[in-house]
Amino acid sequence: FDLDEGLNGSKSSFFHRSIGGYHAAKPRFIQEIFDYHLIKGVQEPLNMLNVKYVVQSDENGERQVTRNAEANGPAWFVEQVQVAPNLDQVMQDLAVINTRYVALVDEKSDLKRQQWMADSLDQIKLIKHAPNHLQYQSQTNTERLAVFSEWYYQPGWNAYIDGQQVPHYRVNYALRALLVPSGNHQISFKFEPDVVVLGGRIQVAVAVFWLIVFCLLTWKRYKKSSDD
């Protein structure tokens, strides 16, 4: 993360995965996270966004790279959900909680205050990363809440466990979370906005229509030549 460039820097996005993404237009809450925490270098929001390196200029104008050894990784299991009265309080509390163990929601969330026992054998790992498709593999002995270092964005993103669509939740003001049942599971997030799905169906329908027209014309030519 380049503090000098902010969320719209092109250099970091060209060479690395960037928390600012690859388009200048962003949901407002992303900019709010940046303005309230990231520009100040507050540690926990950097950790939950899996920022491994911070780039900034020193007092002499020299570019310096600092490694963040406390980054949470692409996904992790938390031990409890804490409920704040509103999203403004969630934003403030991000500076003081340990995001590796705690997930924050507001009172409107479908997630309620819960706790889970930590198990060193439980694990979740990212196995595929594409702009419109993310895949993870999980192994747990009990149900756990997984938090993903990915921006929460609705509508468009759908969550699946072993191919079955399941609800996912907004936590920590800006991230995604998912209740994962015990056992071995494949977790997927797919970007499937209605306009894209509808466009794909129309494209298939048009292709089928022209295929039918082609087959009819071919059959008519064949029939005519046979009659002659």
Image (cartoon, rainbow, N blue to C red):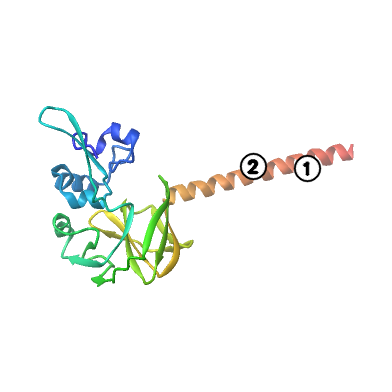
Q: Nearer the viewer, residue 70 or 18?
A: 70
Tell whether label 1 touches label 2 (CB within 8 Å).
no
State whether residue 63 is above or below residue 66. above
In the picture, which quadrant includes the C terminus? Answer: top right
Identify the amino acid type marked 2.
Trp
- The crowd level at tag 2 (other Cα within 10 Å; few <14, some 14-19, many 20+) is few
- Identify the mark at residue 219; answer none if there is no mark: 1
In the picture, which quadrant includes the N terminus? Answer: top left
Q: Position of residue 171 (x, y in %)?
A: 26, 59
Left or right of 101 in this view: 153: right
Which callout, 2 or 1, points at the residue further toward the start of the chain? 2
Residue farthest to the left, as pictured: 59
**Residue appearing at x 43%, y 60% in the figure:** 160
Identify the amino acid type marked 1.
Trp
Left or right of 185 in this view: 118: left
Q: Position of residue 131 (x, y in %)?
A: 40, 44
